[in-house]
Amino acid sequence: MRETFSLAAAILALLAAFVPVVGAILGGEPTKYVGSVGLTGLLGAVFATIAAHSVARQGHAAFAPVATATLIGIWHLLVPTAYDPGGLAVATAYGGGAVLTVFAAYLVFEEIERVAFS
């Protein structure tokens, strides 16, 4: 049961990495904003994919990819303050960033628990 939730968390983190990118494009934001969330969204998706693969193969996420995805999610929460985008971009950055951060952080804490208490 725990592996199933961990895999779902990794997949949700993967999908959430693209939410700010879609919002920035649909919101017609400047290229510098789209580039920033586009690059970090792609990186977040890469690390979330590595985490999902790790959960599927080993039953647990590798620490480094989910820790990195968590930091990228935090960046998505902060990026609207750096660029001052429009409403749709702000909403999707906060929404996608929150989902990415929460589920990636869950996998971080799960991995810490697995290593510390096993």
Image (cartoon, rainbow, N blue to C red):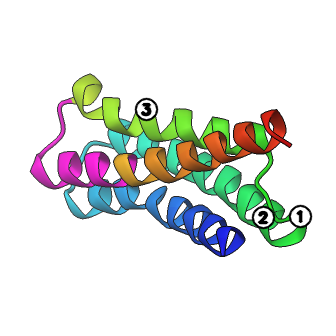
Q: Nearer the viewer, mark 2 or mark 3?
A: 2
Number of residues whose C-alpha sits closer than 10 Å to that of mark 2, classed few (under 14), some (14–19) or many (20 or more): many
The x and y percentages for residue 117 are: 79, 38
Task: Identify whether 116 is placed above or below 99.
Answer: above
Pick the front one: 90 or 35? 90
Q: Going by the image, does 26 lie left or right of 8? A: left
**Label 3 sits on what residue type?**
Trp
Tell me which corner region of the image, top left, top right, bottom left or bottom right, holds residue 56.
bottom right
What span is in magenta?
Answer: 84-97
Please identify the dominant SS of the magenta region.
Answer: helix
Which label sits on residue 55?
2
Residue that numbered label 1 is attached to: 58
Q: Quadrant of the N terminus?
A: bottom right
The quarter holding residue 16 reads: bottom left
Rendering coords of residue 60 (x, y %): 79, 58
Q: Name the residue located 60 percent from the left edge and 43 percent from the top edge.
A: 69
Check if residue 83 falls in the magenta segment. Answer: no
Amino acid carrying mark 1 in the image? Gln
* Residue linked to disc 3: 75
Disc 1 versus disc 2: distance between alpha carbons? 5 Å
Q: Earlier in the sequence, mark 2 or mark 3?
A: 2
Q: CA distance from mark 2 to mark 3?
A: 24 Å
Q: Residues within 10 Å of mark 1 (few under 14, many from 20)?
A: few
Picture residue at 45% right of the left edge, 47% below the top: 102
